[in-house]
Amino acid sequence: MKFGCCAAIEYSEHVRQAGFDFMECTVVSLVPEKGKYEFAEIFRKYKASPLPVEACNVLLPGDMRIVGEQINEDRIKSYLECALNRVHQIGAQVVVFGSGKARSVPTGFSREKGEEQILQFLETAANYAQPLGITIVIEPLNKKESNLINTVEEAQMYAEKVNRPSIQVLADFYHMMEENEPLNHLITAKKYLHHIHVADTGRTAPGQGSYPYADFIRTLKAANYNERVSIECGWGHFEDEIVNAREFLRRQFGE
């Protein structure tokens, strides 16, 4: 199992010193709607990172809706093509599809139609991701952040319907706890489970709250999960807390 941290590329040396294996940065930081000259300076920062960037989150910008009446399909396709090529250039292999605002069903809009639009988006994304060897993982979000795909169980349903190897599932410990989702959904979704996010009570750093980590890890092991685990949380004093969080995960996972 590999352990990473969601952080801006500028913090890569802190993440390395804390003992992590990889970075998880954002897709939007790769400025997919800007040209190659704007990207060149950003790309240099990524190439200079002392840690590999193996995963990327925040797939879509906040103003890019993929559900509802105001859908710009040409913009979406152009964005995905550029974004995933840039993800490939920096060496990342996993892209997290959270983007709660982009995928939420607008008031008065058909939920059934919204679900169809999500499936179409995932199909389009798979067409660009698969040739690049990139896996897109569907992230369930709690209902405060999205009104669609709120559980690992729902994410599994979408992955099954799309039925493409480049579309898999993420489980986020924080969102599972917010939704009171049974941990055994990690086992029922194990065929699709490809990435994990962790935090602690109130979305603090691991080790600062009271989440049942022993139960969570025991269930992950029962699901035969042995891939990446990223911390995605709020930080107080990043440089200090990241060291403590890494040590906490080391103890909990029995490294």
Image (spheres, helix red, strand yellow):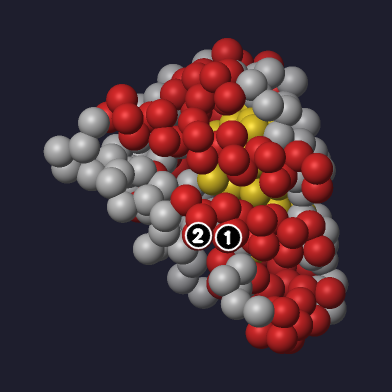
Question: Are the two marked residues, 1 and 2, in contact with CB atoms closer than 8 angstroms?
Answer: yes
Furthest residue in direction top, as rendered: 188
Asked if residue 231 can be seen in this view, the reply is: no
- From the viewer's side, name the closer residue of 120 and 214: 120
* Residue 192 screen position, x and y as percent: 65, 24
As drawn, is 190 to the left or to the right of 133?
Answer: left
Which secondary structure, mark 1?
Answer: helix
| Position in image of residue 130 (x %, y %) | 76, 39
Using the rendered view, name the quadrant where residue 244 is placed: bottom right
User: How dense is the environment of label 1, judged by Cα within 10 Å: few (below 14), some, or many (20 and up)?
Assistant: many
Residue 149 is left or right of residue 56, and the answer is left
Number of callouts in the render?
Answer: 2
Identify which amino acid the numbered label 1 is placed on. Tyr
Compared with 48, 144 (above or below) is: above
Q: Is residue 196 above or below residue 223?
A: below
Residue beneath disc 1: 79
x 66%, y 38%: residue: 126
Above or below, 10 relative to 143: below
Q: Residue furthest front?
A: 74
* Furthest residue toward left: 108
Residue 143 x/y as whole percent: 29, 39
Mark sitting on residue 135: none
Report the amino acid beneath label 2.
Answer: Arg
Which residue sits at x=70%, y=23%? 221
Identify residue for label 2.
Answer: 75
